[in-house]
Image (cartoon, rainbow, N blue to C red):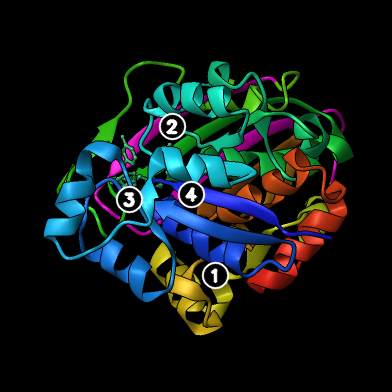
Amino acid sequence: MATVKVGINGYGTIGKRVADAVRKQKDMEVVGIVKAHPNYETRMAVQKGFAVYAPAENVDLFKEAGIEPAGTVDDLIKEVDIMVDCTPGNVGQYYKDKYQAAGVKAIFEGGEEHSLTGVSFNSTANYQESWGVQFSRVVSCNTTALLRTLGPLDKAFRIESAYVTIIRRAADPGDSKTGPVNGLEPSVRLPTHHGPDVQSVMPWLNITTMAVKVSTTLMHVQTVVAKLGRDATTEEVLAVLRAAPRVRLVKAADGIKSTNQIMEMARDLGRDRSDMYEIVVWEEGVKVVGDTLYYYQAVHQESDVIPENVDCIRAMCKMADGPASVAQTNQALGIDH
Ligand code: NAD
């Protein structure tokens, strides 16, 4: 079977990871990446052997910086089956018009609204909804995390309601564009958009969210309180979470007490960029009292959506069913289950 030709528009935190992850799959190839401006990341892309394309208006900037672009964004769009659009939030509509005109499929990221595509994606909760579609959206890092655990828990226990507090990292490690650098900043527009975002994939889920931004860059932490459809035991819940795809249980008793120790574990795993694709749940932090479940989970915001992007390509290009794609992606990225 011919490999699917993939282009990546926007080569930042998410785009560069998607490019490397796609490159590791046997059934797809990266035709090129689009970088808006020539900088160190552009030079790294060239060094890695990616064909670098530029917005038409910036081609001269690239040449002045000593980088010869392989072409413009419009050239790349003509050469691919599917674009993964990893540009910053709210840029999507501009490019969607171009993809539409060229008849090319495209995936957008969580910074865009669900209304841009009308379909949002998670590998296990609703893979089939993106089957063959022209446009889909891989939901944000926080939403992906909630779907990874609430999806299987809802199947097992039917969740009546979920209350989530998201303790959000202020910026990605490589960014210096936002704060707070010494404070805790609550999101005062309540409930936050994360609940409706989960509902773009699981519309029936009764979920409400709040969020506080804190001065850390490594990960988010989410606290979840869920009312289950029946009384359950902590062991039953742990068994569901242990079997859930891309969820990793860790123990505080083993010395993994905080997000920095999770990142140390990710470094020890030897993955690209020390990424932790799985959502990490503290085993001792899972507790059921009657029909009420409490747990904490940590989210590596830079990488948890990467396997989902690969699976979304397979769904949209009708390459494999959901479980087969998840298994294939996991194997290529070194994820256990
Ligand atoms: P980023 O700022 O790290 O990267 C964006 C890239 O797009 C940069 O290389 C930038 O130069 C380029 N760019 C900017 N304007 C452009 C334009 N007009 N045309 C082409 N390229 C342009 O952003 P990111 O963190 O990778 O986020 C990308 C998307 O992924 C957003 O929708 C974001 O909400 C979502 N997302 C981000 C994270 C995260 O934690 N960083 C997690 C999940 C999803």
In the image, 231 versus 272, the foreground residue is 272
Q: Which residue is mark 3?
A: 35
The residue carrying mark 4 is: 8
Do the numbered discs 2 and 1 sit on residues whose CB atoms are within 8 Å? no
The percent coordinates of residue 327 (x first, y second) are 80, 63
Q: Amino acid at mark 4?
A: Ile
In this picture, residue 68 sits left or right of residue 101: left
In the picture shown, does residue 288 fall above or below 69?
A: above
Marks 2/3: CA–CA distance: 18 Å
Mark 3: C-beta under 8 Å from nearest atom of ligand 1:
yes
Magenta residues, dominant SS class:
strand
Q: Secondary structure at mark 2?
A: loop
Give the residue at mark 2.
111
* Pointer 3 local density, CA inside 10 Å: few below 14, some 14–19, many at least 20: many
Disc nearer the start of the sequence (4/1):
4
The residue where tag 1 is placed is: 252
**Residue at the location (33% across, 26% down)?**
187
Q: CA distance from mark 2 to mark 1?
A: 33 Å
